[in-house]
């Protein structure tokens, strides 16, 4: 089964199913055709649903009407990748070296949901499948799944199940994880202008305002010297940090060496001496992810820029409302931006965070299997990233959700040399095999 998995993964990662660039639409379509045939060849009823961003694949298999039904989620779209970004091998061709599989999508998310696909197929063949199965595999997760919630709302009966299973994250602390919370998100673009034209730096330098300098001053006011967001209002309605949460998070090891290996940095910032998982999983953050202004080509253009923009990513506590926080952020910008600067800010790609209910039989069963496979206790983890699909399922289907990451923490998700360590893959396959086995 391991070789079957690698064979299918090798076929799947060849598709450049990049959702952030419309020029890859033919690759998206080819990916959908591949999935449809794969599911049909293994006895599934398959529907390809158009009209909700890139096509959705919904595959249904009824093993026994008396069994419970699990809805398994995944996404086939991937981030862009090119060899020039630092890959040691072609990103859209599966390679194996140093005990790892490498390719774009090998863990985000093709390789992770394919673990469950292959195990379900094996159980169908052996007549040992313990659930009825519905796969929902989408192609727009990397652009925020803008129309997926509408599909879910309109197809509650079609998607009826007893619980949801998804694997779309990284394992922390070298111990099995069940993810129990995700931060919310919004992206925003801040534009500023300090005049109408760029100015000669000799004639006006040191006298006229510089848009880059002014943008830097604004950004420098986002955080205090002790690493706390400067504006208290941006913390409103954030989840309380309880003693129970702190005790839970301190049970997950944070390895300084691993942090340095993954990030290449020794320094990290926190507030009030909070641990990594509390800081990144439960508190808001503001990150400037891009700046544009002036001239950055070959040589020099000695002119003072009159305009600049910043791309800003804000992560939210699971309990915060994105639109409310955005309104507070605008008020904060108005307070810290001088009157001589014209500015505007636009919000994009917002999504609510969510807490995942853990007091149910599905979590208890998965926890027991993970402990058997790993021979270690399970960590209940609050995740710094955002996964809108879980919020969609909770708000519209009211289903218990199991979010179980399968891959190594140094997998380079979204980066060059994205990889799936084989020792983690072996545990993932074993967990999935036992999970779907008829009891």
Image (cartoon, rainbow, N blue to C red):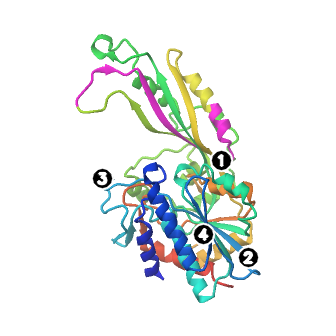
Read off the magenta span.
299-328
- Of callouts 3 and 1, which one flags the residue occurring earlier in the amino acid sequence? 3
Residue 81 placement, left or right of 5: left
Q: Residue at x 63, y 54 (%)?
A: 148
- Nearest to N terminus: mark 2 or mark 3: 2
Say few, some or many: other residues with alpha carbon within 10 Å of mark 3 (under 14 / 14 to 19 / 20 or more): few
Q: Which mark is residue 378?
A: 4
Q: Is residue 257 above or below residue 121?
A: above
Q: Quadrant of residue 201?
A: top left
- Rendered image: mark on residue 203: none
Cα distance between the residues tagged 1 and 2: 29 Å
Q: Which residue is mark 3?
A: 84
C-alpha gap between disc 2 and disc 4: 25 Å
| Extreme-bottom residue of the structure | 126
> Marks 1 and 4: which is nearer the front?
1
* Image quadrant where residue 44 sits: bottom right
Identify the secondary structure beneath mark 2: loop
Measured Cα–Cα span from mark 1 to mark 4: 26 Å
Dot 2 surroundings within 10 Å: few (below 14), some, or many (20 or more)?
Answer: some
Q: Which mark is residue 352?
A: 1
């Amino acid at each position: 089964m391991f070789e079957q998995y690698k064979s299918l993964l090798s076929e799947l990662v060849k598709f450049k199913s990049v959702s952030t660039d419309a020029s890859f639409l033919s690759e998206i379509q080819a990916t959908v055709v591949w999935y449809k045939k794969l599911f049909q060849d293994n006895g599934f009823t398959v529907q390809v649903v158009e009209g909700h961003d890139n096509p959705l694949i919904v595959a249904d298999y009824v093993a026994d009407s008396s069994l419970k039904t699990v809805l398994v989620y995944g996404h086939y779209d991937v981030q862009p990748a090119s060899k020039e970004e630092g890959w040691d091998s072609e990103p859209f061709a599966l390679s194996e070296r140093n005990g790892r599989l490498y390719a774009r999508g090998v863990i985000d998310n093709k390789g992770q949901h394919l673990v469950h696909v292959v195990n379900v197929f094996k159980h169908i063949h052996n007549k040992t499948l313990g659930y009825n199965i519905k796969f929902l595999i989408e192609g727009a997760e990397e652009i925020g799944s803008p129309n997926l919630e509408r599909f879910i709302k309109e197809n509650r009966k079609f998607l009826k199940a007893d619980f949801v299973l998804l694997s779309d994250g990284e394992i922390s602390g070298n111990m099995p994880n069940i993810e129990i919370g995700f931060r919310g998100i919004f992206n925003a673009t801040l534009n500023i202008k300090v005049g109408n034209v760029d100015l000669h730096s000799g004639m006006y330098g040191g006298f006229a305002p510089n848009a880059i300098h002014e943008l830097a001053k604004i950004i420098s006011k986002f955080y205090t010297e002790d690493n706390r967001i400067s504006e208290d209002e941006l913390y409103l309605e954030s989840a309380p940090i309880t003693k129970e949460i702190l005790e839970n998070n301190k049970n997950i090891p944070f390895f300084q060496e691993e942090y340095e290996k993954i990030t290449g940095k020794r320094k990290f910032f926190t507030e009030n001496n909070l641990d990594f998982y509390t800081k990144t999983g439960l508190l808001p953050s503001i990150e400037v992810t891009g700046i544009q202004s002036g001239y950055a080509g070959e040589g020099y253009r000695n002119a003072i820029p009159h305009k600049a923009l910043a791309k800003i990513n804000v992560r939210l506590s699971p309990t915060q409302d994105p639109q409310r926080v955005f309104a507070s952020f605008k008020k904060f910008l108005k307070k810290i931006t001088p009157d001589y600067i014209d500015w505007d800010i636009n919000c994009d790609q917002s999504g609510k965070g969510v807490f995942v209910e853990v007091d149910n039989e599905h979590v208890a069963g998965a926890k027991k299997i993970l402990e058997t496979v790993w021979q270690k206790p399970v960590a209940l983890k609050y995740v710094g990233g955002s996964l809108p699909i879980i919020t969609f399922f909770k708000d519209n289907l009211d289903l218990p959700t199991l979010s179980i990451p399968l891959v190594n923490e140094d997998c380079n998700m979204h980066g060059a040399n994205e990889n799936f360590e084989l020792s983690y893959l072996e545990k993932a396959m074993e967990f999935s095999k036992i999970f779907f086995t008829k009891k």
